[in-house]
Amino acid sequence: MSLPTYLAKLEAESIHILRDGIAEAENPVLLFSAGKDSTVLAHLALRAFYPSPPPLTLLHVDSTWEFTELVDFRDRFVADNNLKLEVTVNEEGKAVGLNPIDHGDRYTSLMRTETLKKALDDGGYDVIFGGARRDEEATRAKERIVSVRERNHVWEPRYQRPELWSHFNWHRNTGQTLRAFPLSNWTEVDLWNYIIHRDIELAPLYYAKRRPVIETDDGLIVVSEEGRLRAFEGIPVRDRLVRFRTLGCWPVTCAIESSAETARDIAAEVLLGQTSERLGRVSDSGSLENQKRNGYF
């Protein structure tokens, strides 16, 4: 299926950013959570360098509280496309039982942010591609497409570089790294329309299905590993027809009630929606900019 003109332009821009950044990088990496955005970004990387494989590693920071279905999809996607994947886990945090309900920001800092920073330092990665989009959340909108990170991966939004006429500055001073966002100018609707036209397979969690759900004050939580978290003990589990707009750690990522079982159904649903997709991320509340300043992607 040929792409509509606006999608073809978005695709071309993203491929240009990937090629441009990789040409300037010494050791590039693509963050791959197996969510819809990083899956589309990985597909764009495959398209950008076809028939050769993309000349970069995929990196997944496994919080140890990932959805089982997401991990299964991640491994299948990497195997099917003959990609190189590095999975990094904070083993110390795992050993002491850190979890997103009981330990909140400390969990996010240690299991995600600090683990990511250590993996980037250990791997010597200098240009780090991610699937964030500006329309997701106000803090995301402050990012340039090529975003400078100082030592220890600190982000200072006041020191971002101008990007006039799509000219990107890939220069790095000693100790600096760059985070690049090829999907910056895409919207959630753009993404789903692209998924439809390119027939991209996603993790099944994005599509409506009857799933075991508990109701909390924050919303509907799909129980990925029943009995693993004490905070949910005694709360009734009921089957509900739900799907996800965004995916994070399962105890703090809310599903939405939906009957949308296909990408076309979801695109129509999103087009009529009135809320941000990241409202389902309970852990984002009031802290995303501070997390990003400290190195969170």
Image: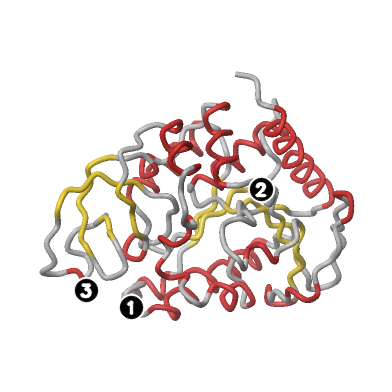
User: Nearer the N terminus, badge 3 or badge 1?
Assistant: 1
Give SS at disc 1: loop
Residue under the image location 50 percent in, 45 percent down? 36
Q: Cα distance, mark 3 to mark 1?
A: 17 Å
Residue under the image location 66 percent in, 48 percent down? 183
Mark 1 is surrounded, within 10 Å at the Cα level, by few (under 14), some (14 to 19) or many (20 or more) other residues, namely few
Residue under the image location 74 percent in, 57 percent down? 127
The mark found on residue 220 in the picture is none
Rendered-image quadrant of the C terminus: bottom right
Does 75 sit above or below residue 4?
Answer: below
User: Nearer the N terminus, badge 3 or badge 2?
Assistant: 2
Residue under the image location 57 percent in, 26 percent down? 197
Closer-to-camera residue (81/296):
296
Please provide percent x and percent y for residue 215: 22, 63
Residue labelled with disc 1: 96
Residue labelled with disc 2: 183
Given this view, does label 3 or label 1 mark the residue nearer the observer?
A: 3
Amino acid type at circle 2 is Leu
Amino acid type at circle 1 is Val
Amino acid type at circle 3 is Ala
Mark 3 is surrounded, within 10 Å at the Cα level, by few (under 14), some (14 to 19) or many (20 or more) other residues, namely few
Give SS at disc 3: helix
Rendered-image quadrant of the N terminus: top right
Left-right relation of 275 to 45:
left
Given this view, does label 2 or label 1 mark the residue nearer the observer?
A: 2
Mark 2 is surrounded, within 10 Å at the Cα level, by few (under 14), some (14 to 19) or many (20 or more) other residues, namely many
The mark found on residue 231 in the picture is 3
Marks 3 and 2: CB-CB under 8 Å?
no
Using the rendered view, name the quadrant where residue 11 is placed: top right
Given this view, does label 3 or label 2 mark the residue nearer the observer?
A: 2
Left-right relation of 97 to 16:
left
